[in-house]
Image: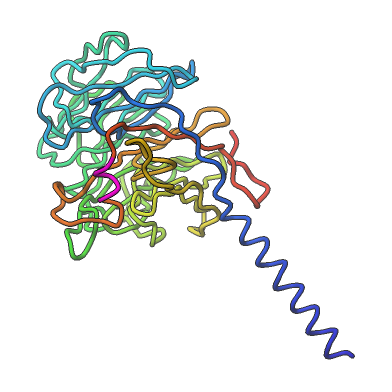
């Protein structure tokens, strides 16, 4: 009887543990927030202003033509399309500066960051053009308002002051460099980046290596030695940190949002891909960037067929090739099963 009682307790404990762990992988509901106009390029960067309007960059790998930013209201209705003065059509990261409120847009084709001086017309000037930049990608900010720009091909994070101008090589590392196939895929290195709440560490996604890299901030603001913080996020792309220092990361090759805690442990996997219908992805397809506003996380579905870009296919390349109308998705800003929602 005692042996049977012990076996029963073990089974109950195992069932309880499995049930609790499984709740962390509650995918939740992915809603289609908005659909880009017919003929629009692949959506890549995304940000939200104080009014809840959502700004999305278009990414054309060729860079031909002028870059466009699509602006939607909080119900997903297209308000306007901005043509960014002096830009290429290969736009990536986009953010509002946290103190100046200027809209900044990364242009990988022109190797610069544009300052949008009119968010109704797209009129822009050059914010910074780092000398030697090879693959400018995403934007981050420290508490002093300094601007950090990831460089996917150089393995660098550039830094400039709140007003832009000349940029310095804040940190370069092999851990931030691109790893070309067969060693890494997709072939992009340093990507999304954000600071922890204390401002003591910058976290940077390395897409090709499937890693998050931590860079400590030393006295005076200098960069410390980068280290791999956690591994195995399949195509780690855009990211942000919530108030609990959980890191929300786009896994662009597994079509999900992975949330890891401050120890590097996965605590949630959110969203999924559910096919292409009527030319548009259902759920997440190559999620590239995400932005939090209120109760929602907005996600740009890049839906990029990597074959023309990288010379090899991924498991979703053939689906991406079917997409004729691009979408923005959203999910609830909550972490199921752990009693924490990452709420600010």
Residue 90 forms part of the magenta stretch: no
Q: The C terminus appears in which quarter of the rendering?
A: top right
Q: Is residue 3 above or below residue 140?
A: below
Q: Is residue 159 above or below residue 226?
A: above
Tell whether 122 sits left or right of 310: right
> Is the residue 106 above or below the residue 252 in the image?
above
Residue sitting at the far front? 278
- Horizontal and vertical percent for residue 100? 37, 17
Residue 121, percent across and down? 26, 8
For the stretch drawn in magenta, the main secondary structure is helix
Which residue is at 32% across, 55% downward? 226
229 sits to left or right of 8: left
- Residue at image x 72%, y 66%? 16
Q: Residue at x 51, y 48 (%)?
A: 270
Q: For the magenta stretch, what is the residue range?
A: 318-322
Q: Quadrant of residue 180?
A: bottom left
Q: In which quadrant of the rendered view does residue 295 lie? A: top right
For the N terminus, the image quarter is bottom right
- Residue drawn at the location 80% of the way across and 80% of the way down: 8
For the image shown, how many numbered marks are present on the structure? 0
**Quarter holding residue 35:** top left
204 left or right, relative to 200: left
């Amino acid at each position: 009887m005692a042996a049977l009682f012990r076996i029963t307790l073990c089974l109950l404990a195992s069932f309880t543990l499995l049930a609790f762990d499984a709740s962390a992988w509650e995918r939740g509901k992915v809603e289609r927030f908005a659909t880009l106009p017919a003929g629009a390029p692949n959506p890549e960067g995304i940000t939200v202003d104080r009014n809840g309007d959502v700004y999305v960059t278009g990414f054309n790998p060729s860079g031909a033509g002028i870059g466009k930013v699509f602006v939607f209201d909080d119900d997903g209705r297209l308000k306007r399309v901005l043509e960014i003065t002096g830009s290429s059509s290969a736009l990536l990261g986009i953010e509002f500066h946290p103190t100046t409120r200027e809209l900044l847009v990364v242009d990988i084709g022109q190797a610069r960051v544009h300052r949008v001086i009119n968010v109704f017309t797209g009129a822009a000037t050059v914010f910074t053009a780092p000398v030697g930049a090879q693959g400018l990608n995403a934007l981050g900010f420290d508490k002093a308002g300094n601007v950090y720009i990831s460089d996917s091909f150089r393995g660098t994070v550039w830094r400039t002051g709140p007003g832009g101008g000349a940029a310095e090589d804040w940190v370069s590392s092999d851990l931030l460099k691109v790893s070309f196939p067969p060693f890494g895929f997709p072939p992009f290195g340093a990507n999304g980046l954000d600071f922890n709440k204390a401002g003591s560490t910058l976290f940077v996604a390395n897409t090709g290596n499937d890693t998050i890299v931590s860079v400590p901030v030393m006295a005076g603001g200098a960069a410390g030695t980068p280290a791999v913080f956690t591994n195995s996020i399949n195509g780690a792309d855009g990211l942000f940190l919530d108030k609990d220092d959980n890191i929300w990361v786009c896994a662009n090759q597994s079509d999900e949002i992975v949330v890891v805690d401050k120890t590097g442990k996965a605590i949630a996997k959110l969203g999924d891909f559910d096919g292409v219908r009527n030319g548009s992805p259902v759920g997440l397809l190559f999620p590239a960037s995400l932005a939090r506003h209120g109760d929602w996380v907005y996600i740009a579905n890049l839906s990029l067929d990597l074959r023309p870009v990288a010379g090899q296919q991924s498991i979703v390349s053939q689906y991406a090739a079917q997409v004729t109308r691009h979408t923005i998705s959203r999910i609830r800003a909550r972490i199921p099963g752990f009693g924490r929602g990452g709420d600010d």
